[in-house]
Image (spheres, rainbow, N blue to C red):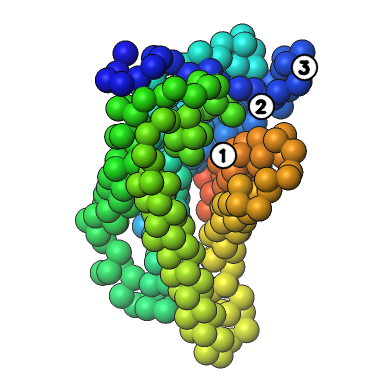
Amino acid sequence: MWPNSSFSSFLLTGFPGLEAAHHWISIPFFIVYISVLFGNGTLLLLIKEDHNLHEPMYYFLAMLAATDLGLTLTTMPTVLGVLWLNHREIGNVACFSQAYFIHSLSFVESGVLLAMAYDRFIAICNPLRYTSILTNTRVVKIGLVVLMRGFVSVVPPISPLYFFPYCHSHVLSHAFCLHQDVIKLACADTTFNRLYPVVLVVLIFVLDSLIILISYVLILKSVLSIASRDERAKALNTCVSHICCVLVFYITVIGLSLIHRFGKEVPHIVHLIMSYVYFLFPPLMNPIIYSVKTKQIQSGILHLFTTHKVRP
């Protein structure tokens, strides 16, 4: 038991009032989890195997797929454990660690989407210098900065969780641990833990989305200056997949934020559904979007599976 803790574990919650239907509810969750693992795993394998995809744009896509895989693997064990086995108990260390990775990877995903916007900005607004600006070394540095920002920024609010006393109920409202859930159960001064995440969300989610928006305004301005209509369409088409992924991610972020901020009268089940949409919908949709909208990915997947099929 950690210092000052009144207990050493928490109880996770599935869908209150629907416990008898948990086995049925688990079916779509299992299908979505398998689809996320298969889709993002395939993207990573494809980008690794296909030398035609060894470009900055696809390296960033691989980072996005890896982040989605990490986020899915972080939540999947406890969610399916609650729905399948009614295994609700989770130790303090496991709970706080899960919360750390969930929040860190969410910020990493936002950073990767920002890096992808930067890639598109350079490719369209400064195409002649694209390869000299986005070298492999610079792509690695950008990736490390994104990772460091996500994983380091979440340490300050998560670390105190290990030492807070928990004298309220130890029942959490989700089938996975979130910082905002745990902090409600603490019997201590949690002012820092309530204010810091708000600042962090503004500095990361809000600032990233604004920079992405500005980059696309500049991209649109550059595209409209191209004389050829076909060239304009071709340039914009390279951005469609990324724009779709950005919309999927930030719309779910905004939806979840609005529900938490103004949805006090909204049934708890709506809060739960929005949380699952936030954590599952972007990882599910991102590989589908890129597979449908990117010809190189389509041909690469076809080649990957046909090559493996004809092997003895």
* Cα–Cα gap, marks 3 and 2: 13 Å
Using the image, determine if residue 307 lies above or below residue 290.
Answer: above
Q: Secondary structure at mark 3?
A: helix
> In which quadrant of the rendered view does residue 154 lie?
top left
Left or right: residue 81 compared with residue 133:
right
* Cα–Cα gap, marks 1 and 2: 12 Å
Which is more foreground, mark 1 or mark 3? Answer: 3
Q: Residue at (36%, 25%) from the top-left corner?
A: 165
Label 2, on which residue? 29
Q: Residue at (53%, 53%) from the top-left corner?
A: 296
- Marks 1 and 3: CB-CB under 8 Å? no
Label 3 neighbour load within 10 Å: few <14, some 14-19, many 20+: few
- Marks 1 and 2: CB-CB under 8 Å? no
Q: Position of residue 280 (x, y in %)?
A: 60, 38
Using the image, determine if residue 174 lies above or below residue 125.
Answer: above
Type of the residue with mark 3:
Ala
Type of the residue with mark 1:
Phe
Looking at the image, which is closer to me, 102 or 184?
Answer: 184
Label 3, on which residue? 21
Question: Is residue 112 at least partly visible in the picture?
Answer: no
Q: Secondary structure at mark 2?
A: helix
Q: Position of residue 161 (x, y in %)?
A: 35, 31
Label 2 neighbour load within 10 Å: few <14, some 14-19, many 20+: some
Label 1 neighbour load within 10 Å: few <14, some 14-19, many 20+: some
Q: Residue at (68%, 48%) from the top-left corner?
A: 263
Left or right: residue 64 compared with residue 152:
right
Q: Say whether disc 1 or disc 3 marks the residue closer to the N-terminus.
A: 3
Label 1, on which residue? 279
